[in-house]
Structure formats: structure tokens, C-alpha cells
Image (spheres, helix red, strand yellow):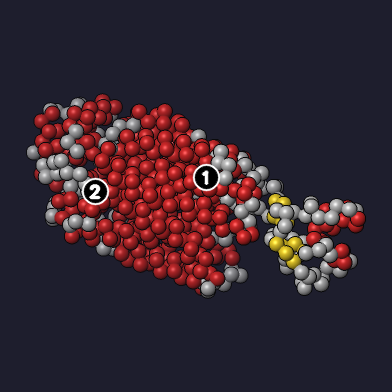
Amino acid sequence: MKFESILEEIDGFGPFQIAIIVLLCTPRIVLPCHFLLNNFIAAVPPHHCDISTLDNGGHFRNLTQAQRLTVSIPVRENGDPKSCEMFAEPQFQLLSNSSDSNDLQTVQCQSGWVYDNSTFTSTLATEWDLVCDRKSLTKTTGTIFFSGVMMGAIAFGFLCDKYGRKNTLLASYIMAMVFGFSSAFANSYILFAVLRFLTGFGLTGITINSIVLSIEWVDVGHRSFIGVIGSLAWSAGNMLLAGFAFLVNDWRTLIMTVTAPLGFAVLTWWLIPESARWLLANGKMEKAQYYLDRCAKFNKRQKLSSKLKLETLSNIQILENQDKNYSYLDLLKTPKMRQLTLLTGIVWYGVASTYYGISLNISGFGLNMYLTHFIYAAIEVPAKLMVYFLLNIIGRKKCQAGTLLLTGTCIAINIFVPKDLWHVRATVAILGKGLSEASFTTIFLYTTELYPTVVRQNGLGYTSFISRVGVSVAPLILLLEDVWTLLPQVIICTVAIISGLVSFLLPETLNVRLPETIDDIEKPRRNHVSSHSLESS
């Protein structure tokens, strides 16, 4: 007997399951707002050396601001003032002839910088002067945040399987909210970086739990619907971030704005059910009975016919696993689990590195950054809807491999398309972005179906960790353009194609029951839903 037999009786896709999706939408909307927050809070506005402390008497006092800049700061080829240099001495002769300024002696900015506040009131760069020699520190905050996400993936993967999905979800909410708000009040760069690390750590629990909690309550036929439609909350949050950032130009206020919805998530947490599948796998029959009866009542179905069926199922699931605590080592102890762990790790790395590599490397459309961000987010919606239909038509494996291979193809095309054909390059890049998002949506659902219940959270924690390695490496890959302009695209294209080919080695999970124990992975089994009636006794 399998858990799906019980779900059939109480309705595996009804108002109860829809309510779970709705309750988890708010925290899911917060995720992209934090994951992509650095695009705005770490933006570096145009700036130049502060010349207000220079000679305030004599000729300098009688000059206009434009003339003062001319005699104090060298210009780039496009005529804009240089950001990090100033003349050692005011060059008044440039007022009559500015063409011979190249050979004049320059020094680094002596008294700080003046920033263009027309787009942002304040950012990390303007708050702590993270420009010129310190400009890498703005990107470092992103790396530190994703390091927290990586560590959180390991910790919450273990905690969720040990203490249940619901309890660790509340811990994630509170941790992300407390450290998120705290980071908005940081008075030093170091403190801000530490708080961003801890915010990322907390947010990972929401990432892992929200998808698994939804999937474990739904029947086989609607798993892809729950996975894909639920993930549209990410796209909604991504688009909302552009709006929030447009309306809120101060980085501290913006952080508080995107963190605030977690307060509502905490208030509605008590309505979210624990996973009955997890409760059964851990021998907690009474709690499982309570939530299953609640589901039946909500879906207007009869309560379970007898406790005997529940006890029988629970005994089957915990028979060989009594008093055993599962850990990440269980992902490696048996041959087929080792193979599954290796293959999913490769695919997750490829998906994450490709997605963020493209996202960070697509040039704008000549629009402002808010509109560009919104367009990139909006592209994800049709990509996800396309995935929803394809997942149930061609299956998970072909969908995963196909989206990755086509993403690699798009990158390869842009390697050879001349830069003059910007409209062609932009179209191909947008298509590649959509396909890379489709591969991300697929792998989230696919992974939950590949790992057995007893180590599902550990499996997702491991793959989430690997994906964050891919995210962290993506910016480093883009730095290689200094070696060869096309090298980043060649590397990202290769990674996409290799991970797409590796996807073909994974088993298909379309219309296959979720594995409950490690034995379900190791031993050949008949898991297709058509065998449902054979297992009803």
C-alpha cells in the first residue's frame, strides 16, 4: 500500500491543496525580492571626485560648477567625468582648450565622491563609498548572501527531515524576517554583510519547504500543476521587485519593504498543515490521522474508513527504518542513490550556473534598469506555462534535457551573431532566458519526485547547495571576458549542453508514484499509477 491510495479517498487535489498553495504564495513572492535585491541596493550611480574642498578663493570661486569640473577632473572619451581620478592641481588652461588634458598629472580622489542621486537616493555604494578601489565590495555582498543560502540549504535539509516541514518553515519565516529587518539598520558594511548572510540562511528554509510541502499533499496527476503554478509566485515577486525598487529609492527602506510580507506569512503559518506523508514515514500516526481527516473534511470527502488502513501503511513505511535517523550520508550509502545524487548534482549546477550566467550577461534593451528587470521577469511567465503543458506530454526527463540543450543552443547562436544585429541577439537572448527559467522550474519538480520521502529534504538541501555553488561561480565566469571576450559564453554554453545530456541518464517520473523509502530506489518496482488497484489491499 502507498500514500497515494489514501490521497485518492480524501481527494488528492481539492480546496485543501489549493489553500496550501495560496498560503505559501506570500513567502514565495518574498524570495526573488531578496535573491535579486542586489541589482538595486548595490547599484553604483554615476560619480566623480568631490572637489568642494579645493581652492575656495581666487579664480576657483568665480567659476560655474561645470567649469570647476573641467579644470579639476579629467574626462572619458564620451565626455563624462572620470569616476576615480582628479587633476593634481586645477588646470585653468582647459577652459580655453580641453584637448590636451591626456598628459596632465592625475591623482586618486582625495576628499571622497559626489554621486548622481537622480535614480537612487542612496545605495550601498553611496552609503559606504564602495567605488573605485572598493567597488568589488558591492558584488561581494551578493556572494556573501548566497553563501548564507548555501549553508542554509545544508542545515534546513537536515532539520526539515528531522523535525518536520511545518516547524522548520516557521523558523525560516522568523529568521528571515528578523535578520532582513535588522540588515536595514546596519551601521557598517561588515555588520550588513553578516546580516545578509543570515537572511539568506533563513530564506533557504522557505525555498525548500514551500515546494515540498505542496508536492507531498497532492496526487500524482496534479504534481506538475502544483509545482509550476506555485512557482509563478517567484515570477510575480520578481516583477513586483522592479515596482518596489522604482517607488522606493533608498536601500534601507527597500529592504524593509520587501521583507514586510513575511509578517503576514508568520500570522498565517498556523493554517498550514504538516506533511502527512512525512508524519507517516516517521511513525506519527495520530498527527497524520488528524491532518488527513482535516483534508477530507475540507475537500468534502468521507473520513478514512478505518484507522487500520493508516496503521498498516505506517507499519510498512517504518518497518525497516524504526529509530533510524536519516542524514546526507544516506544519499551515498547505496549504489543507485549514489548515482542519483551525482546526476542530480550535475544537472542542478548546470541549471543554476546557466540561468544566472545568462541573467547577469544579457545587455539591456536601451531601457532603464527597472523596465529591463520587469521584462526579464515577465519572460518567465510564458516559459513556466509552457513547461506545465510539456511536463505532462513529453515527460520530465525530455523536458529537462530539452530546455537545457536549447538554452545552450541559444547561447551558441549569440556567440556567432554579429553585434550589429542587436535585435536578433536580443531576441535569442530573451528566448535563452525563458528556456533557462523553464529548466529551473522543471528541476525543482523533478527533484522532489526523484528522491524518496525519508531523505527528500536532504536531497533537496544537497541539490540546493550545489545550485548555489553554480550561482556563486556564474559572476566569476563572466570575469573571464578579460581573457577572451567570448570565453564566458563558451563556458556557459558548454555547461548547459553537458548538464542537458546528463539529464537523459535520470529516470522518468511522469505518472510514477513518489518513492517512500530508499528501497524503492534500490529495488526494481512497479510504481506506475496504473498498478493502483493492485496495491489497494
Mark 2 neighbour class, 10 Å CA radius: few under 14, some 14 to 19, many 20 or more: some
- Along the viewing direction, whichever of 284 and 369 lies nearer the viewer: 284
Amino acid identity at mark 1: Leu
Label 1: element kind: helix
Residue drawn 36% across the image and 52% down it? 464
The percent position of residue 17, horizontal first and vertical second, equals 31, 35
**Left or right of 316 on screen, residue 115:** right
Mark 1 neighbour class, 10 Å CA radius: few under 14, some 14 to 19, many 20 or more: some
Query: Which label sits on residue 327?
Result: 2
Amino acid identity at mark 2: Ser
- Along the viewing direction, whichever of 446 and 399 lies nearer the viewer: 446
In the figure, 352 relative to 253: above or below? below
- Quadrant placement of the C terminus: top left
Residue drawn 17% across the image and 32% down it? 285
Residue drawn 32% across the image and 66% down it? 501
Instruction: List the residue tagged with mark 1.
Output: 191
The percent position of residue 55, horizontal first and vertical second, equals 84, 55
Residue 259 shows in this picture: yes
